[in-house]
């Protein structure tokens, strides 16, 4: 998720373009009129894994960010629909192509009662990107700020970072190029403010219960490693009057079956994820409690474009054409995911979905065309492919299906190589594979995140393809101030690059999970699957 | 005997050193590293991270650096759990594992020995078959089958106990995991005890004792029990170590924050310092428990002298 750095916009910009402008009213739990709430507003949800840290500078995982969004609040935030809403900043505007001004609310306080100021953001962002902090995710987000990458790489001091406090309640942000989606970017947990005095005083211990000072809707109450994180309502939070939950327990159960068992026995209200193959039966058993919204994520197979066999576009195209995504989605994974024939997924902002022409052909015609392509290249039946995936039943099932498609329709043999996850990702990053399982999930809703998968020299481009023309279109698109023009250019770029068949898009992720019927505030249409506990409430039951 | 104990304790030092060295090399030669993640870490950030954890040094220097920390009682900073040191993690997980694994071991030994005695004294009777059937169920059914059965019975069908989780040593969260670990171990101990006691009971010195007219209760308790316990004591050491440090399935199924979970996560996350710290702990525990077992031999069998 690291788009190429944008070149500076040389010309004068039409300035004062108003940004998101989503100056919505308070963004807390929306309890429908007439709803009867439970007197006990406590929720237990499984968060899937132990967070790697509770320090916003070190958060890398989805699980860690989920807790941080409750403990800390950035300039902006996202609500239960996934839309950007004001956070500590009550308003913002883009004053020129690369400059944004955020106005902070006077009522924003730390949990110790001190006001949250623009300086807290300057301190936090500098600390996050400081090479001495050594945050794994620094370059991923630093790329958006002026001098961000140079600071991460140690080429410029942190004081050169494109953020400054104009006064206590006004923050100016300079971006590396035009970043029209900056309000999305600064909603991520890593761009939260940090309490300078507490960190200076306590060092690494500042994130422990009793030590942590935070500014979110909740404060840290208890943290038992590999067991749970408990948070309680923060009375100092600026919108505390609209926060319903008083206590939330995040479990970190990784085993899907253990997760289900805790749900069934009433130990938790909110599952993280179903075990592979469990969806159909559980949906029948708990029809009212099963939720399955689409996620802004793509399941795909990476094709090593530098591989001697796969360097020919016709081979890559043939391999992609014969995989029947409909059967894959309905019979193999069978958990509500949608077939995919392009890079962009449904609901992704700033881009339209593209689809290969042949996706609507009958399968016989697709197979005939694929065979012809292979024959033209001279690839004979019996040729061996090497497929690499990480050892999980889910991926194995999908891999066997793909291998069977290539065998029965093209006569190609597939050698399976099941690896541990860390080994797979190292091999993918190093280009030491032929066909590899892959997947990508958006951390905020903008096309840039997905385009990073196919841009030349992008750290996320495991396929090692490069289409210079598509890259140029992406640069041009990101310089547009008109959202429609930007979307048109980015869509054109995605279509162009996907016509190179750098990868095999397969499915759009969904999030099947069970949630107790008394939990209010969950929205199946939230494609980012990011939730704040301030948006939840417990119905009387 | 004290000289023997001191000698055995001193042997711990080269043992730990050898184990740590081998593990250190194995870990560093395993493909994949602690900083590999879905989003590729940029070269500059990788360099920052390696410098922070001293991974930019040559391997031998890293090794010496680690040994130096180890000698000072510092197991290092965890790669995976950024806010915690390995000392912190072990200090929090060890009491949990000791409480679950240790309690289960004590119950399993008492129950297993009692079952073995009953079965041996009623050899080939209905009681023997019944006791051994119960014991063998624990032996043939793996923990990933027994665990769900226990939860289904006592947490879901009869909602008496929580199906998992942990709440600061609250007994209700400990009952099912202890029951599971006990069931797994009790069968092994029971079977060994039964076989051993049957063998001892057919010995000449037992026949002599019975010929002297001693009641069976006295024969068993005073003469047969101690020698019959020797094989049981031999397996207690390894069983205790695995129950305390490697109850991975039990901990995972019941979501218990013990050492087993740390070991699995540490290995898959390539958390070098965490894995090494746990290896040191397991090694020390193994040496200590083996020493205890050896000392118990001497107590049980007067022929053994140290």
Image (cartoon, coloured by chain):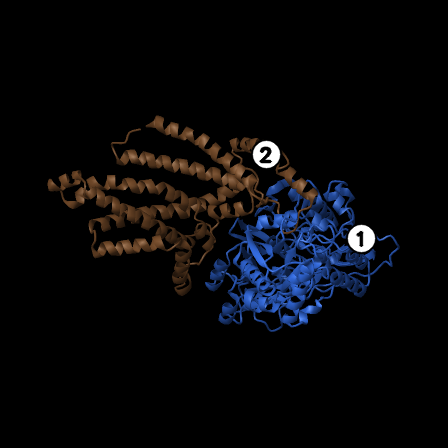
Q: Residues within 10 Å of mark 2 (few under 14, many from 20)?
A: some
Task: Determine the secondary structure under disc 1.
Answer: loop
To which residue does mark 2 refer? B59
Relative placement, left or right, of B239 versus B39 is: left
**Front tag of 2 and 1:** 2
To which residue does mark 1 refer? A177
Relative placement, left or right, of B231 versus B269 is: left
Chain letter for brown, please. Answer: B
Task: Determine the secondary structure under disc 2.
Answer: helix
Q: Is disc 2 in contact with disc 1, using a CB cutoff of under 8 Å?
A: no
Relative placement, left or right, of A376 versus B127 is: right
- The numbered disc on residue B229 is none
In depth, the one of A521 and A294 nearer the eye is: A294
B113 in relation to B24, above or below: below
Q: Position of residue A19 (x, y in %)?
A: 79, 60
Rendering colour (chain A): blue
In depth, the one of A48 and A248 nearer the eye is: A48
Q: In this view, which residue lies farthest toward the right?
A: A12
Q: Position of residue B92 (x, y in %)?
A: 49, 44
In depth, the one of A99 and A131 nearer the eye is: A131
Relative placement, left or right, of A460 versus A517 is: right
Chain for mark 1?
Answer: A
Q: Position of residue B125 (x, y in %)?
A: 20, 55
Chain for mark 2?
Answer: B
Point 73% across, 42% down: residue = A153
User: In the figure, residue B202 lies in which quadrant?
Assistant: top left
User: In the figure, residue A245 lies in which quadrant?
Assistant: bottom right
Q: Is residue A167 something one can see in this rendering?
A: yes
CA distance for labels 2 and 1 = 42 Å
Q: Position of residue A136 (x, y in %)?
A: 65, 46
Point 69% across, 69% down: residue = A358
B77 in relation to A414, above or below: above
């Amino acid at each position: 998720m690291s788009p190429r750095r944008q070149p500076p916009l040389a010309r004068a910009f039409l300035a004062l373009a108003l940004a998101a402008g989503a100056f919505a009213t308070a963004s807390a739990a929306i309890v429908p009129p007439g709803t009867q709430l439970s007197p006990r507003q406590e929720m237990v949800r499984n968060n899937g894994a132990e967070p790697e840290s509770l320090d916003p500078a070190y958060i890398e995982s989805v699980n860690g960010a989920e807790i941080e969004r409750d403990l800390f609040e950035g300039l902006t935030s996202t609500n239960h629909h996934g839309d950007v809403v004001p956070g500590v900043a009550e308003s913002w505007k883009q004053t020129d192509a690369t400059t944004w001004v955020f106005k902070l609310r006077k009522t924003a306080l730390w949990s110790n009662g001190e006001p949250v100021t623009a300086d807290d953001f300057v301190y936090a962002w500098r600390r996050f990107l400081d090479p001495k902090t050594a945050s794994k995710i620094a370059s991923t987000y630093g790329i958006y700020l002026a001098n961000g990458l140079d600071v991460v790489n140690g080429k410029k001091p942190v004081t050169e970072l494109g953020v400054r406090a104009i006064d206590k309640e006004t923050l100016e942000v300079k971006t590396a190029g035009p970043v029209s989606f900056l309000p999305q970017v600064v909603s991520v947990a890593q761009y939260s403010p940090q309490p300078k005095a507490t960190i200076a005083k306590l060092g690494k211990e500042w994130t422990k219960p009793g030590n942590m000072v935070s500014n979110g809707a909740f404060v840290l109450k208890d943290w038992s490693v590999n067991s749970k994180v408990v948070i309680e309502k923060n009375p100092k939070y600026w919108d505390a009057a609209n926060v319903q939950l008083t206590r939330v327990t995040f479990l970190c159960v990784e085993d899907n079956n253990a997760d289900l068992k805790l749900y069934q026995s009433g130990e938790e209200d909110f599952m993280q994820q179903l075990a592979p193959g469990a969806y159909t039966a559980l949906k029948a058993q708990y029809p009212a409690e099963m939720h399955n919204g689409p996620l802004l994520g793509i399941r795909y197979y990476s094709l090593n474009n530098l591989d001697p066999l796969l360097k020919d576009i016709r081979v890559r195209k043939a391999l992609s054409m014969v995989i029947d995504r409909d059967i894959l989605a309905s019979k193999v994974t069978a958990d509500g995911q949608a077939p995919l024939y392009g890079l962009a997924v449904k609901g992704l902002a700033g881009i339209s979905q593209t689809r290969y022409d042949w996706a609507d052909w009958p399968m016989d015609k697709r197979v005939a065309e694929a065979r012809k392509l292979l024959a033209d290249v001279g690839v004979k039946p019996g040729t061996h492919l090497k497929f690499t995936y990480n050892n999980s039943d889910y991926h194995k099932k999908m891999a066997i299906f793909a291998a069977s498609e290539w065998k029965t329709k093209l006569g190609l043999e597939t050698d399976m190589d099941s690896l541990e996850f860390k080994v797979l990702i190292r091999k993918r990053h190093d280009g030491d594979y032929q066909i590899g399982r892959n997947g990508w999930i958006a951390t905020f809703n903008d096309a840039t995140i997905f385009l990073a998968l196919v841009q030349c020299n992008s750290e996320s481009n495991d396929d090692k393809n490069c289409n210079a023309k598509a890259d140029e279109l992406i640069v041009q698109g990101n310089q547009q101030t008109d959202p429609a023009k930007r979307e048109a250019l980015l869509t054109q770029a995605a279509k162009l690059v996907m016509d190179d068949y750098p990868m095999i898009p397969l499915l759009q992720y969904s999030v099947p999970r069970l949630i107790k019927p008394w939990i209010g505030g969950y929205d199946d249409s939230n494609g980012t699957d990011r939730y704040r506990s301030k948006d939840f409430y417990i119905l009387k039951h | 005997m004290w000289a023997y104990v001191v000698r055995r304790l001193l042997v711990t030092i080269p043992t730990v050193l050898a184990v740590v060295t081998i593990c250190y090399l194995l870990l560093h030669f395993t493909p994949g590293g602690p900083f590999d993640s879905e989003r590729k870490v940029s070269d500059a950030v990788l360099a920052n991270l390696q410098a922070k954890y001293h991974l930019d040094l040559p391997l031998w220097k890293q090794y010496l650096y680690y040994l130096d920390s180890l000698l000072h009682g510092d197991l290092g900073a965890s790669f995976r759990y950024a806010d915690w040191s390995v000392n912190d993690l072990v200090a929090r997980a060890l009491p949990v594992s000791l409480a679950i694994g240790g309690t289960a071991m004590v119950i399993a030994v008492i129950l297993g020995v009692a079952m073995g005695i009953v079965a041996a004294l009623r050899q080939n009777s209905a009681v023997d078959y019944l006791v051994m059937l119960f014991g063998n169920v624990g032996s043939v059914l793996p923990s990933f089958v027994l665990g769900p059965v226990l939860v289904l019975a006592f947490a879901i069908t009869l909602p008496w106990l929580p199906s998992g989780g942990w709440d600061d040593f609250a007994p209700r969260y400990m009952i099912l995991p202890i029951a599971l670990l006990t069931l797994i171990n009790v069968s092994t101990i029971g079977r060994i005890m039964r076989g051993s006691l049957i063998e001892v009971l057919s010995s000449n010195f037992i026949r002599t004792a019975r010929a002297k007219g001693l009641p069976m209760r006295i024969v068993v308790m005073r003469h047969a029990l101690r020698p019959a316990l020797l094989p049981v004591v031999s397996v207690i050491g390894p069983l205790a170590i695995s129950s305390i440090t490697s109850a991975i399935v039990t901990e995972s199924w019941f979501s218990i924050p013990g050492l087993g979970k740390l070991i699995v996560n540490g290995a898959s996350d390539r958390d070098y310092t965490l894995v090494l710290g746990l290896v040191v702990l397991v090694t020390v525990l193994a040496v200590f428990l083996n020493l205890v077992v050896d000392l118990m031999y001497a107590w049980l069998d007067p022929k053994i002298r140290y």
